[in-house]
Structure formats: structure tokens, C-alpha cells
């Protein structure tokens, strides 16, 4: 029994490596941001873009559409966030007997710490800020360069901005 | 003995919690309604009534309020607070639950808890003195109407709650704001 507990520190990193989505996405490139301008009021335009995009993409179990504020720049951001926490406990480690159970539970428990990670993991986003002239808006459309999907997603946000600032 | 009973209960509920889906940001609300008042006072009053009725108040679930940093909408959420380790251990039966309970801790009932919630009501200003409320409910055996009715019942006495001049409606001190990370850029 003691040996099982001693083996745990060895097993946990192995298991958690399997579910580390952060490392997976860090390997992906990002598309160059696209600058846009239009007319409107930040919050109303953010809500309009959110409503247009909701349900068209960002439908995975680990994904949610959000309206949030960028703490660094103060921009209002409409984004698709892919966070490991949204799916709940997901370790698919299947071991043998009690040792397997203990390793699984320990891996999920460690994973729950990452699930509370306050960072966002954007897949595509649109950052909004008031322009220099009264009533104007500046925006930045951005997307993760996932093969075949990235450019379309950046365009999705650019189109939504265009439609919401007419 | 009581502890064993509680843990057996957790095993059962933990297994159910895995099937939960349906939260803001995934789909439009299942249902919307409007009442008179301001979002924060109406949401706070609804939460107080739900708490008084012991709704969403168990070892598995807890209520929390949070304000959106941009839209100022107030989210009233019934969070899944089962320790993740207990939920994972449930797959291995009572012994798994016991191990899970030994190593796990209760998840918080605030926006840092991103697990699929049991239900969420979002209170938004829809004009002067009008609050629009959208409902999202996870898949459950009882069906969504069961939970929507509970929130609506709790909301009944909250119609017309306005912000008092001394309390800023959109900057309630007791409401934890949504986290505001550097979005729009990849976060490694």
C-alpha cells in the first residue's frame, strides 16, 4: 500500500501531461491582428457582436463566448475562450485496481487547480475601444491560426464588427 | 456513519453532474422574462430568497453573484461545488469517493469556478427601470422548467427593486468582478 503512495508522484506528471491543453495550444501560431474602424457605442456593439457570433462557432465542450475587459489595455473584448475548466473533470486515465483509482483521483485533483486558472485562452477575439473622434470605434480582430479555421474566424469577427457598426 | 452516508450521496450526485451542459456563452437563453427594477437589487433579492428556501444549498451546489466587467449584467449562478477529486473517485465506487474526499477540497462558488453550473440567470438592464432576465439550465432529470420555476418563484417578491441612491447600481462592493485577464492575445 505504501509503495502505491510512493509511486504517485511519478504517475501524476505522466498523467497530467496527457491533459495539458495549454502546451498544445502554445505550439500553435497566431494570425496577424486586423485593425478595423467603425461607428457606435462600445457596450452596445460588443453585445451585438456577441449575439451574432453565439452559436455559429465556439461550440465545443471546453469553449464559451464571453464579453470581458482586457485588464492591460482596458479594451472591451468579445471572445471565444477555450478553458480546461469548462468541461469539468476530464482525466481519461484508466489504471488497474486501487493504484489506478488513486492515480486517477490525484491527477484530476491536480487538474482542478488548473481549472481555476483565471487566464483566458482565446481562440478568436475582437477587442473594442473608443476612437479618437466622438462616436467612433477602433477594433482589433484576432484569431489563433488553427489550420483552415483561423482566417475564417478572424473574418467572422471582422464581418460581425462591420454589421454591428453600420 | 453520517459521513459515509454523505459520501454515498456525493457518489450519486457526482455521477449526475457529469451530464450537465448549458451555460451562458454556449447558446442563447432557454427562456427570457422581464421585471421592473435594477439588475443588481433584483438579483440580490432573488438570491436571498433562494437561500432562505434552501435552494441550491448543499454539499454539491452553492449560489454566487458576479458582475460582468463590460455589460454590467449580473449573473446569478448555481455552481457545482463538488470537490473534483470526489467526482473523479465516484467512478471507482465508495472507496474512490473516500479517497477523493480525503484529498479534494470544495470548489468555490464564484467566477473562478468554471465547471458546468446547474443553472444561471443573467439580469441585464433593458431600459430605465426594466430588467431582462435570461435563463440557462443544465441537462437534468427534472428538466429545465423545474429550475426556471424555482428562480421565478424566488424572484416574485423582487419585482420593482430599485437601486437606492447611496448604493451604486453597477458597482456593488460585495460582488466579485469577473476576472479580467489580458484577452485578445494568446495566453501561454
Image (spheres, helix red, strand yellow):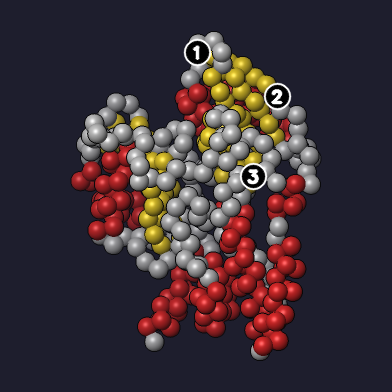
Gap in angstroms between the C-alphas marked 3 and 2? 19 Å
In the image, B172: left or right of A41? left
Gap in angstroms between the C-alphas marked 1 and 2? 21 Å
Q: Which of the 4 quarters of the picture holds residue A1?
A: bottom right
Gap in angstroms between the C-alphas marked 1 and 3? 31 Å
Few, some or many residues within 10 Å of mark 1 (<14, 14–19, 20+)? few
Among the two numbered marks 3 and 2 on one chain, the one whose residue lies closer to the N terminus? 2
Q: Quadrant of the C terminus of chain A?
A: top right
Q: Secondary structure at mark 2?
A: strand
The chain carrying label 1 is A
The chain carrying label 3 is A
The chain carrying label 2 is A
Q: Secondary structure at mark 1?
A: loop
| Disc 3 target residue | A121
Among the two numbered marks 1 and 3 on one chain, the one whose residue lies closer to the N terminus? 3
Residue plotted at (58% across, 52% down):
A117
Residue B30 rendering spot, x and y as whole percentages? 43, 44
Above or below A38: residue B96? below
| Disc 1 target residue | A135
Residue plotted at (48% across, 20% down):
A41
Q: Nearer the viewer, residue B152 or A129?
A: A129
Q: Do the residues marked 3 and 2 share a common chain? A: yes
| Disc 2 target residue | A34
Above or below B21: residue A154? above
Residue plotted at (47% across, 66% down):
B106
Q: Which of the 4 quarters of the picture holds residue A107?
A: bottom right
Q: Do the residues marked 1 and 2 share a common chain? A: yes
Q: Secondary structure at mark 3?
A: loop
User: Which mark is drawn over residue B29?
Assistant: none
Few, some or many residues within 10 Å of mark 2 (<14, 14–19, 20+)? some
Residues at marks 3 and 2 touching, judged by CB atoms closer than 8 Å: no
Amino acid at each position: 500500500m505504501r509503495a502505491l503512495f510512493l509511486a504517485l508522484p511519478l504517475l501524476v506528471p505522466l498523467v497530467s501531461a496527457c491533459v495539458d491543453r495549454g502546451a498544445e495550444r502554445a505550439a500553435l501560431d497566431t494570425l496577424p491582428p486586423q485593425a478595423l474602424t467603425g461607428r457606435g457605442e462600445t457596450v452596445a456593439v460588443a453585445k451585438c457582436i456577441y449575439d451574432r457570433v453565439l452559436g455559429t462557432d465556439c461550440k465545443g465542450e471546453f469553449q464559451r463566448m464571453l464579453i470581458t475587459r482586457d485588464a492591460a489595455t482596458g479594451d472591451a473584448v468579445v471572445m471565444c475562450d477555450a478553458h480546461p475548466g469548462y468541461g469539468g473533470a476530464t482525466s481519461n486515465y484508466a489504471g488497474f485496481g486501487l493504484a489506478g483509482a488513486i492515480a486517477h483521483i490525484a491527477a484530476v485533483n491536480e487538474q482542478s487547480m488548473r481549472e481555476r486558472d483565471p487566464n483566458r485562452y482565446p481562440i478568436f477575439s475582437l477587442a473594442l475601444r473608443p476612437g479618437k473622434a466622438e462616436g467612433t470605434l477602433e477594433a482589433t480582430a484576432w484569431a489563433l491560426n488553427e489550420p483552415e479555421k483561423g482566417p475564417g474566424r478572424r473574418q467572422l469577427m471582422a464581418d460581425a464588427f462591420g454589421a454591428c457598426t453600420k | 456513519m453520517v459521513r459515509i452516508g454523505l459520501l454515498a450521496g456525493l457518489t450519486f450526485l457526482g455521477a449526475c453532474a457529469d451530464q450537465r451542459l448549458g451555460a451562458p456563452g454556449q447558446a442563447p437563453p432557454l427562456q427570457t422574462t422581464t421585471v421592473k427594477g435594477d439588475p443588481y437589487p433584483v438579483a440580490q433579492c432573488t438570491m436571498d430568497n433562494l437561500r432562505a428556501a434552501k435552494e441550491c444549498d448543499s454539499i454539491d451546489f452553492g449560489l454566487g453573484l458576479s458582475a460582468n466587467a463590460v455589460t454590467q449584467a449580473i449573473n446569478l449562478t448555481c455552481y457545482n461545488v463538488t470537490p473534483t477529486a470526489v467526482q473523479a473517485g465516484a467512478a471507482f465506487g465508495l472507496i474512490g469517493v473516500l479517497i477523493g474526499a480525503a484529498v479534494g477540497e470544495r470548489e468555490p462558488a464564484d467566477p473562478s469556478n468554471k465547471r458546468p453550473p446547474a443553472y444561471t440567470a443573467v439580469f441585464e438592464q433593458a431600459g430605465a427601470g426594466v430588467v431582462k432576465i435570461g435563463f440557462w439550465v443544465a441537462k437534468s432529470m427534472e428538466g429545465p422548467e423545474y429550475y426556471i420555476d424555482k428562480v421565478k418563484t424566488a424572484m416574485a417578491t423582487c419585482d420593482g427593486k430599485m437601486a437606492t441612491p447611496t448604493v451604486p447600481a453597477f458597482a456593488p462592493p460585495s460582488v466579485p468582478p469577473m476576472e479580467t485577464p489580458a484577452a485578445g492575445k494568446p495566453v501561454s
